Image (cartoon, rainbow, N blue to C red):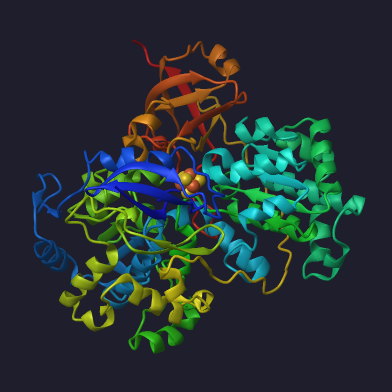
Amino acid sequence: MKTVASICPYCGCGCRLLFMVENNKILKMAPDKSDEPSEGMACIKGLTIHETVGNNDGRILKPLIRMDKDEQFKEASWDEAYHFIHERTRDLAPSEVFINASGKITNEDCYITQKFARIAYKTNNIDACCARLCHVTTVQGLENCFGSRAAFSKMNDVYSVDCLFIIGSNPASNYPVLHYRILKAKRRGMKVVSSQAVYNVTAKFSDVSLLIYPGTELILLNGIMNALIHQGAYDKSVETVEGFDRLKHVLELYSIDFVRQACGVELEQLNQLIEHIANSKSLGIIHGMGLTQHATGSENVHALLNLMILKNAQLLSLRGEINVQGVGDMGCLPDRLPTGPLATAPLLEDKWKTNVPIGKGKTIVEAFLISPPKAAFISGMNAAQSLPNLNVVHKNLRNMFVVVLDHYFNLTTKFADVVLPTPLLIEREGTITNGERRVRLVRKVADVCGNCKPEWQVFKEFSTLFGCAEYFNYKEPRDITREIVNVVPAYRQIDVASVYGGADAWAEKRMFFRRFMPEHFEGVEDIRSDKYPLILTSFRSQHHFLTGEMTNRSKTLMSFREGPFCYLSPLDAERLSISNGEVVEVSSSVGNITCEAQIDNSIPKGIVGMHFHFEKLLVNKLFPTQFDEKTFTPNYKMTAVGIRKVPL
Ligand code: SF4
C-alpha cells in the first residue's frame, strides 16, 4: 500500500490529505499532520473520500453520444465524440456557444478551457459556475474597495483577532477546518458574534447571535457602522479614505431602533453585538453565501467591506468549492481575461500570438435562464440542479446542444447530447488555488476511470478540428502552469518547479487602495402573500457538498439522513397541522415540489429551510429568476412559499 499526499476535492479550505492506495484503489484516508492550512486535521467529508471513489456506480467511464435527446446514449470513441461535436457546432456564431469551467478542476484545466473558448469558438461566453453562483459579488466588491480580486487574510489570522463577526455563514458546514480554528481561538478568549437567518451551529456557540430576517443584512451592517461612528469606535485614520463623508451621511438613517425593527431582533442583543464589535481592538470578519446570494448581494458585500475598512479588520473570506478562487483568476469569466479586464486584450494577444474576442460574454445565468445559446459545454457543473428557476433551465437545456464533461451521471447528463468522462480532481495533476489564494499541488492519487481525460487534454485534442492546435501544444500540466505564470499577473511570482516539488506558493494578496462604497437599503417589498406566507431559504449540510454527486455516494455521510427534507419551525408546523415526517407540497410563484417535513427548533417562525444537495429535492425549482443585477449571482436565500400537507 502506498500513501499519496494530495488535495481534498471539496471545499475552499483546500486541505492536503493522505490517500492510502493499493492496486489503484483508495483504501483509507487520513489527515496530513504536516499540512499548514488544515493544521493536520480534516473533516468527515474529506475522511470518507475512499467510500465515494470506491463506489463506481454512476461514474461516467466512456464518451457517449446520441443523435436525439429522446434516444439512448451510445458509446463512442473520443475521436467520434470530437467529430460529432465539431459537426454540430462548427457553423455557430461566437454568441451561439457557451462554455463553463468549474471550481472542481485544476487551474491548468480552467486556463485551457477559457483559452479554447476564446481561440476556437472566438467567444467570451465563458463563465465559472461556482464563482458566479456564490462569490463573484465578493470578488467584485474587493476589487471596488481595494483594487484586489482576493481577500488578504489567511486562515491562521483567526488567532490574531480578539473578536470574530460571522455574518451569513456557517463555517461548521462550509469550511470545517476553519471552524476548528475558530473553536480553538474561542477557547483562548476570542469573542464570537454572529448574525444569520437560522439558528445554526455558528449561532449556538456565538457569544451573541442575532437571527435576522433574510434580506436585511445591509440594514444590520449599516446600523452597526452608524453606531460605531457615533461612539467613535473606529480607526480614525480612515477619515481620509475616499467615501468616508458619504458613508457617514448614508449611515445616518440607520438608527438602532430602525435596525431592530427592520431586522426583527431584540434591542439588548443588538446592543451587545455592537458593543463587542466596538470594543474590539482587532476584529475579524467571516461572511458567506447568506450575504452574497441575494438580489442585493453586491450592496451587502460593499457594506461588509465598509465595516472592514472602518475597523481596520481582517476579512477571512473563503470559497465554497476547492478552486473557486483559481477558476476566476484563470479568466474563466465573461468580462475578465487571464491578463485582467477585457481592456487588457492586446496584452493577452501578445502572449497568445492570436486575436481574442472583444465585448463581454454571457454569464451562466444569462446562458441558461435569459438568452440561451444554441450549444453549451457544461464542465463540472450540475446546471439542471444548481441554477434557480429550474423549470425554465430544463426547458432551455432541452432546446440546446449540450456537451457535458463530468465524473458522474447527474440530472444535467439527462439533457446532454454528448457526455465526456473526466477525472476527479484527485485523478489529475496540476494546481489549485484555495480560498486564501494559496497555490497548491494536486497529485494524481489513482486512476479509477481509465478512459477519462482532463479538460486540458480534451480541448487540446479537440483543437485540431478547429485548426488551432498550435495554441495548445502542451505535453503535461506543468507546461500550462508555466504559461499561467507568464500570463496571469497575480501568479507572476510563483516558482513552478517549487510548486511541483510540493511547496505551496501564494498568488498576489495586495491591497492597492482603500475606498468606501456606501450603500443604501433601497427597500425590498414584503414578498409574502396569503398564498405564499413563508420565506424559503437554502443552506448547506456539514455532511454533503454542492449537488451531492460525490457525498451522496458515501455510506457514512448518507447515514446522517439529512434529506431530502424541508425544515420548518414548531410554531408553523402546529399552525399548519403538519407532523414530523409527513409529506408536504411546497410551492412558490415558479414551481412546486413535494418532500418530507421535519420540525426543527433551529428554524425561526415564518421560515422554511432546505438543503440543495439532493436530486430528489429540487429546491431550486422554487427560486425565481432573481439575481444581483451587478454580478448575476442568484438569490437563493429568500423567496415566498406556501406549504400544504399532501393528502394520503
Ligand atoms: Fe476537505 Fe474542506 Fe473538509 Fe478540508 S475542510 S477535509 S478541504 S471538505
Image mark count: 0
In front: 184, or 574?
Answer: 184
Residue 18 in view (yes/no): yes
Residue 350, position as x, y percentages in the image: 40, 89
Query: Which residue is found at the position 34% from the left and 30% from the top?
Result: 555
In front: 4, or 98?
Answer: 4
Left or right of 75 in this view: 398: right
Residue 582, position as x, y percentages in the image: 42, 14
In front: 304, or 526?
Answer: 304
Quarter of the image that includes the C terminus: top left
- Vertical comparison of 62 with 216: above or below: below
Query: Which residue is found at the position 35% from the left and 60% from the top?
Result: 100
In front: 195, or 477?
Answer: 477
Left or right of 73 in this view: 389: right
Residue lying at the far right of the rendered structure = 231
Give the quarter of the image for residue 589: top left
Left or right of 632 in this view: 362: left
Residue 89, position as x, y percentages in the image: 19, 67
- Vertical comparison of 76 with 71: above or below: below
Residue 389 in view (yes/no): no
- Vertical comparison of 77 with 205: above or below: below
Residue 623, position as x, y percentages in the image: 45, 40
